[in-house]
Image (cartoon, helix red, strand yellow):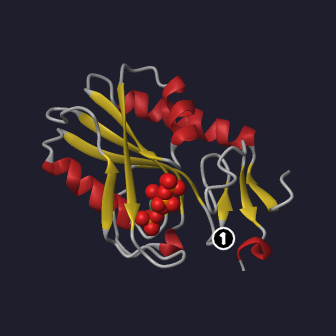
């Protein structure tokens, strides 16, 4: 375990099991659909690659990168598209792949943005969700695991751009950020 990690919240084995279960459900739900996975960079990178390997339906992939303005750990709800998807969404069944939903502000913006691009459908799958932090009540179609309001790192998730490469999800020691 990394020295800055207080404890491991989701082991590699647990993540693998969650991803496999979710991919099975998604594969059933998207039979005969025009599935486009859109990973929300950067946090979704590991989840996206693991999830797509487990899908048994055909899919295309794309990425979008958004940043939300805010102070400290709070997001303001104002979202800026840093890198947009690289294809038209008309007629596509878009599944947004996210690492964690906190306030819901980012996905509230992105789902509306994709709907305005004439996607046939827009759904959300997330590895982690922090329901205690929700500000905007967005419908989330696939949730891997609900987590407590702790600072989580690893498996794509960062603190100050570090720890994304850890293969597990851990809780950051408060001494690192306080
Ligand atoms: C994180 C996370 C979500 C968003 C969730 O991204 O990946 O996209 O915050 O927060 P919200 O529900 O309060 O909007 P971040 O902006 O830290 O960028 P990253 O993906 O590059 O880590």
> Residue 58 lies in what quarter of the image?
top left
Where does the image place residue 156, in percent across and percent down from the top left? 60, 47
In this figure, which residue is indicated by the disc labeled 1?
A: 150
Q: Is residue 77 left or right of residue 7?
A: left
Q: Is residue 72 above or below residue 148?
A: below
Q: Is residue 62 left or right of residue 159?
A: left
**Label 1 neighbour load within 10 Å: few <14, some 14-19, many 20+:** few
Q: Nearer the viewer, residue 132 or 80?
A: 80
Q: Is residue 33 above or below residue 163?
A: above
Where does the image place residue 95, in percent across and percent down from the top left? 34, 40
Give the quarter of the figure containing the C terminus.
bottom right
Identify the residue at image location x=65%, y=37%.
17
> From where the camera sits, is residue 100 visible?
no
Where does the image place residue 78, in percent across and percent down from the top left? 31, 70
> From where the camera sits, is residue 88 visible?
yes
Identify the residue at image location x=74%, y=38%.
13
Q: Secondary structure at mark 1?
A: loop
Where does the image place residue 53, in percent across and percent down from the top left? 53, 24
Q: Is residue 57 left or right of residue 92?
A: right
Q: Is residue 160 above or below residue 91?
A: below
> Residue 122 lies in what quarter of the image?
top left
Identify the residue at image location x=61%, y=72%.
149
């Amino acid at each position: 375990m990394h020295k800055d990690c207080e404890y491991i919240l989701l082991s590699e084995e647990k993540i693998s099991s969650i991803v496999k279960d979710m991919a099975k459900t998604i594969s059933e739900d998207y039979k005969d659909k025009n599935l486009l996975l859109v990973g929300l960079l950067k946090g979704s990178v590991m989840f996206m690659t693991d999830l797509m390997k487990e899908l048994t339906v055909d899919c295309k992939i794309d990425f979008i990168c958004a940043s939300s303005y805010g102070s400290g750990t709070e997001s303001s709800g104002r979202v800026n598209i840093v890198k947009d998807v690289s294809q038209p969404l008309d007629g596509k069944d878009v599944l947004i792949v996210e690492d964690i939903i906190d306030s819901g502000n980012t996905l509230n913006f992105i789902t509306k943005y994709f709907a305005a691009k004439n996607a046939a459908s827009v759904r959300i799958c997330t590895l982690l969700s922090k329901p205690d932090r929700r500000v905007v009540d967005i419908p989330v179609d696939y949730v891997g695991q609900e987590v407590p309001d702790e600072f989580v790192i690893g498996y794509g998730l960062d603190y100050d751009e570090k720890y994304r490469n850890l293969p597990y999800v851990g809780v950051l020691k408060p001494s690192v950020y306080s």
